[in-house]
Image: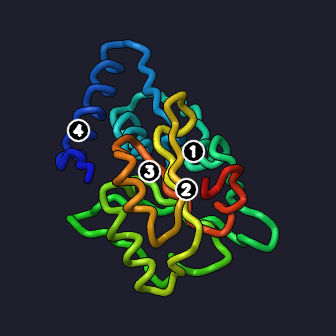
Amino acid sequence: PPTRPDNRSNQQHTINERIVAHAEKGKNVVRLKGGDPFIYGRGGEELESVVEAGIDVIVVPGITAALGAASYAGIPLTYRNLSQSVRFVTGHRVENAVNLDWPEMGRSEQTLVIYMGLVGLAEILEKLIEHGCEVQRPAALIEHATLPEQRVIDGTVGNLAQLANEANIDGPSIVVIGEVVALRPGFGS
C-alpha cells in the first residue's frame, strides 16, 4: 500500500514560515494550490500565519478536488432520487487512526467523498461495511483528477481497495461512494 510522509505538520510549518519570510522581504508571494485551499488544503493554517504576521493577503479560491474529480470522471455528486446530500470527509490518519463517524458515513441516499483516503482505503471500506454500508454500493477512486494522467477505478465498497491495489494506484486520489457512481459513463467496464 502507498505511504505518505509522517511529518506533514513539520512540512506545513516550514511552508508557513517561507510564505511569511518572503512577504516580509517585500516580495509578492503567491501560494498556488491545486483545488480549494480551504477544503483539506491547509489554506486556513497558511492564512492564519500571514495574518498573525500582519501581512496583507488576498485569497483566490479554486474549485475543490472533489468537484473537479467527479466532473472529469462523469459522476454527478447529487442526482434526483439517488443522493440527497454530499458528505466530504478526510480519510487521512490522525494520530494513526481514521476518525470518522462510521454509522453516518454508510447511510444510503447520500454521496460520500473521501479526500486523502488511499493509504487507509481498505480499513475505511471495511469500517463502512461493518457499520451497515452495502458491499455492492458503487464506488470509484479517481487518481490524478483533472490531469492528463487521470485514472478512474470503478468498483464497489466491497472490492475497490483490491482493485486500487491491483492497479498500483499511488498518486493523489479522491474516493466517491454512492449510487451516483453507477451513473458514470463506462461504470463497471
Q: Which residue is mark 2?
A: 154
Q: Which residue is mark 4?
A: 11
**Lower position in the chain sequence, tag 3 or tag 2:** 3
188, 31: nearer the viewer: 188
Residue 83 appears in which quarter of the rendering?
A: bottom right
Q: Which residue is mark 3?
A: 40
Mark 4–mark 1 Cα distance, whole angstroms, equals: 22 Å
- Indicate the amino acid at tag 4: Gln
Q: Nearer the viewer, mark 3 or mark 2?
A: 2
- Residue positioned 44% across, 47% down in the render: 173
84, 54: nearer the viewer: 84
Q: At which x and y percent is residue 75?
A: 67, 53
Q: Is residue 175 left or right of residue 188?
A: left
- Residue farthest to the front? 189
Mark 3–mark 1 Cα distance, whole angstroms, equals: 9 Å
Q: At which x and y percent is residue 56?
A: 47, 28
**Lower position in the chain sequence, tag 3 or tag 1:** 3
Mark 2–mark 1 Cα distance, whole angstroms, equals: 21 Å
Q: Which residue is mark 1?
A: 64
- Indicate the amino acid at tag 1: Thr
Q: Is there a contact, CB below 8 Å, between mark 2 and mark 1?
A: no
**Lower position in the chain sequence, tag 2 or tag 1:** 1
Mark 4–mark 2 Cα distance, whole angstroms, equals: 33 Å
- Residue positioned 69% across, 54% down in the render: 184
Sort mark 3 into few (<14), some (14-19) or many (20+) by Cα contacts within 10 Å.
some
Q: At which x and y percent is residue 47?
A: 42, 39
Per the image, label 1 sits on a secondary structure element best described as loop
Per the image, label 3 sits on a secondary structure element best described as loop
51, 122: nearer the viewer: 122
